[in-house]
Image (cartoon, rainbow, N blue to C red):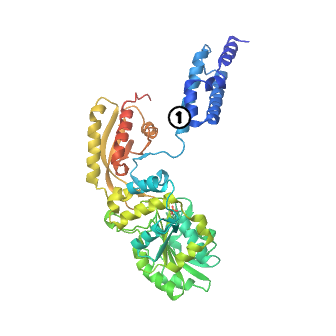
Amino acid sequence: MSDQAMAKAAALRSLPSVDQLLRTEPALKLRDRIGATRITALARSVTEEIRAQIQAGRVADSISREDLLLQSVRLLEEAGKRESQLGIRRVINATGVILHTNLGRAPLSQAARVAISQEAAGYCTLEYDPLSGLRGRRGARVEMLLSEITGAEDALVVNNCAAAAFLVLSVLAKDRETIVSRGELVEIGGDFRVPDVMANSGTHMVEVGTTNRTRLDDYRRAITERTRVIMRVHQSNYRIIGFTSSPTVTELAALAHESNLLLFEDAGSGVLIDLSRHGLGDEPIVQFSIRDGADIVSFSGDKLLGGIQAGLIVGRRDIVGRLRKHSLYRALRVDKLTLAALAATLESFVRGASLQEVPALRMLAFSKTEITERAQALQESLSTLLQESPLKIGLIEGTSAIGGGSGPNTHPVTTLIALHHETLSVDELQRHLRLSTPPVITRIADRKVLIDLRTVAAEEEADLMAAIANLANLAGTK
Ligand SMILES: *Cc1c(COP(=O)(O)O)cnc(C)c1O
C-alpha cells in the first residue's frame, strides 16, 4: 500500500460511527427537536459524506479522530438547521408585490389572526349555536356578511375561486352548454385555465367573438336549447388595449334572462370597495355585478379582498341553494380557520375600515410620501453602522406591483432602498438576505438589491434592519 492509501485507511478507521455521533451533546439536543428517526438518518448521511470526502482525498490525511468527530458534528448541525428551515416560515416580503402568490398572497389582518388563533383553533362554534344549543350552519356568519356587503341574496364559501367556478359550472351546466367570449379564455397563475376548468366541470364550452371584440349579438347567436349559462370572466392578469369591446353585465344579464339562462361572472379579484383612486378602476366591483343582474358571481378570498384563500360565491338564493345542496360542495367547502379569518376580514369592510385594517389594502393605499419617510428613517438609523462598510445604501424612485393576477397595469409609485456592495455581487447580497432569519425577499434591478417598504409591516422593520446590518458586517470575499 502506498503512503497515501495507508493514510486514507487510517482516516477511515478514525471516522466516528453513527452511534458515536448520535451520543454527542449537539446531536442529543437536535434529537429532541426533530426526533430519533430523523436524527439517525441525518447522522448516517453525514457519516457517509465524510467517508466519501476521505476516499476522494478531500480530507487532510493527518486528521485526528477528534477533528473528524468535530467535523461530523458541524455537518450534522448544518443539516439540522436546513431541516428546521423546511415548511412554512414567516418571511419579510420586501419585493413590493402586494399579493405575492409564492409568499402566501394577502397577509391577514390583525383581527383575522386573532380570530384564527384565539377563537377557531380549539373547539369553536363552527356548526353550533350556543343560543339554542342546537346545530348551526357552517359558514352562516360569513355568508351573512357577504350578502350584506354585496347586496346578494345568498352566499357560499369554497376552497378557492377555481373551486367556485368548477362548482358553479358543474352544478348549473354539466352536459349542457356555456357561452364564453374568446377574449376571456385566460390562464391565471399557470394552473387556472378557463377552458380546462370548463372541460373538467363537464360543461360544453361555446366560444364566441374574437380575442379583442365580442358583441352581444355574438352571444345571442350562440344560444341553443342546450345552453344553460353565459359566463363572463375577468381578464385579471392581462389586458387587451386598443380596438376592443365587450357587452356590459347589464346587457349580458338582459340577454341571459330573456333566454331563460343564467349569467355567471368569475370576477377573480373581486373588489368590494371602489379602488379606482388607487389605480384599480378596472377591477369588477362585486356589488355592481349583482346590482347589474349577474345571477352568480365568484371571486377570491385572498386577492384584493385581502383575506385568506377561499372562493366566494354570491348571488340568487335559489341558485346558491342548489350549489349548497350539491354533493360536490361537501368536497370543496372550507375549514373553521378559513371561516374565522374571512369573517374577521369581512367585518372590516362592514365597518368601512378596510383601507385601514386590511393589510393588502392599506399597502395599496400607502402614499409615496409615507414610504419615503419610512425609507429615510431606516437609512438614517443604519448610517452610523454603514459609515466604514463596503455595503452602500441609497434611495431611488420606483414602482410597486399588485400581483396575484390583479391590476397588471397598476404600478403604485414608491421609494426603494437600493443596496450594493463593493465586493459582493447583487446575487450574493440577495442570497444572504434570503438566508436571514426571517428570510428577507427582495428583487434586483440595475445591479442593485431593491427593498420596497410598501409590503413591509412597521413591526417587521427591526428584523429587516438587523438583516441589512448583518450584510454590512460581511467581509466580502469574492
Ligand atoms: C385568480 C383568479 C381565479 C383563481 O382564483 P384562486 O382563488 O386562486 O383559485 C379564477 N378566476 C379569475 C378570473 C381569477 O382572476
Residue at 65% from the left image edge and 77% from the top image edge: 175
Q: Is the residue 267 above or below the residue 223 in the image?
A: above
Q: Where is residue 11 shown, x and y percent of the image?
A: 65, 16
Q: Quadrant of the N terminus?
A: top right
Return the residue found at the far right: 1
Identified by mark 1, the residue type is Lys
Residue at 66% from the left image edge and 26% from the top image edge: 18
Local packing at callout 1 (Cα closer than 10 Å; few below 14, some 14-19, many 20+) is few
Q: Where is residue 217 shown, x and y percent of the image?
A: 50, 84
Q: Is the residue 30 above or below the residue 332 in the image?
A: above
Q: Where is residue 199 shown, x and y percent of the image?
A: 62, 70
Pick the front one: 318 or 395: 318
The residue to which callout 1 is attached is 81
Residue at 59% from the left image edge and 74% from the top image edge: 325
Q: Where is residue 149 shown, x and y percent of the image?
A: 39, 71
Q: Quadrant of the C terminus?
A: top left
